[in-house]
Image (tube, grey):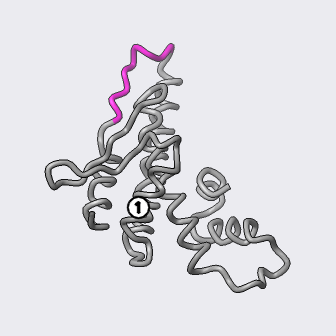
């Protein structure tokens, strides 16, 4: 599989409408709160996907492996009839989790990429490797995204 085909498939997957049903919520404020959370997950996924897309050193194989190892393997990158697609097995409620699954897979691939290619040698300025990585991601993505996906 080609990396660009995987990027396109993940992009299509995260741009799907979530399909929230108002009847599943007790009131308008809880429904709107869920909508905001889902929209934040979409923004996060798009930002992580853009990071992956512009780095040639993050390969298709890395993304496939990340999908197999992350989010309990519920999001898989598959090839059917010569086209790349995403298979996702819902855990509880599709609208609130499918974009989070994509974020988890992308964050896993990014973590591995940065650990292998961007970390300094043995000198982390007095930090552990994990602390160095978390600080790096805080600078790259901001505190809130770092705490959601790289903690």
Q: Quadrant of the N terminus?
A: bottom left
Query: Above or below — where is 5 with respect to 122?
Result: above
Residue 116 located left or right of residue 7: right
Q: Give the residue displayed 45% in from the left and 39% down from the top.
A: 38
Residue 150 located left or right of residue 10: right
Q: Indicate the position of residue 134 as horizontal and vertical percent values.
A: 69, 65
Q: Which residues are magenta?
A: 18-26
Residue 14 located left or right of residue 106: left
- Structural crowding at the residue carrying mark 1, measured as other residues with C-alpha within 10 Å and reported as few (<14), some (14–19) or many (≥20): many
22 is within the stretch colored magenta: yes
Furthest-right residue in view?
Answer: 126
Q: Give the residue displayed 59% in from the left and 56% down from the top.
A: 145
Between 84 and 17, the one nearer to me in the picture: 84
Q: Give the residue displayed 61% in from the left and 73% down from the top.
A: 115
Residue 123 located left or right of residue 104: right
Between 70 and 126, the one nearer to me in the picture: 70
Tag 1 residue: 49
Q: Indicate the position of residue 18 as horizontal and vertical percent values.
A: 35, 34
State whether the magenta stretch is mostly helix, strand or loop: loop
Q: Indicate the position of residue 143 as horizontal and vertical percent values.
A: 66, 59
Query: Above or below — where is 101 with respect to 113?
Result: above
Q: Indicate the position of residue 3 as horizontal and vertical percent values.
A: 31, 67
| Element assignment for label 1 | helix
Q: Give the residue displayed 24% in from the left and 54% down from the top.
A: 84
Query: Above or below — where is 3 with respect to 13?
Result: below
């Amino acid at each position: 599989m080609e990396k660009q085909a995987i990027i396109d498939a993940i992009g299509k997957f995260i741009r799907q409408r979530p399909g929230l049903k108002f009847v599943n919520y007790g009131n308008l404020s809880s429904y709107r709160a869920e909508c905001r959370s889902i929209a934040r997950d979409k923004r996060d996924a798009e930002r992580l996907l853009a990071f992956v897309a512009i780095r040639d050193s993050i390969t298709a194989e890395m993304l496939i492996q990340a999908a197999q190892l992350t989010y309990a393997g519920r999001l898989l990158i598959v090839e059917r009839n010569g086209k790349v697609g995403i298979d996702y097995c819902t855990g509880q409620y599709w609208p609130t989790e499918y974009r989070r699954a994509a974020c988890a897979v992308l964050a896993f691939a990014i973590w591995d990429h940065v650990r292998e290619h961007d970390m300094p040698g043995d000198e982390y300025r007095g930090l552990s490797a994990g602390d160095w990585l978390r600080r790096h991601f805080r600078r790259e993505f901001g505190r809130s995204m770092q705490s959601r996906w790289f903690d």
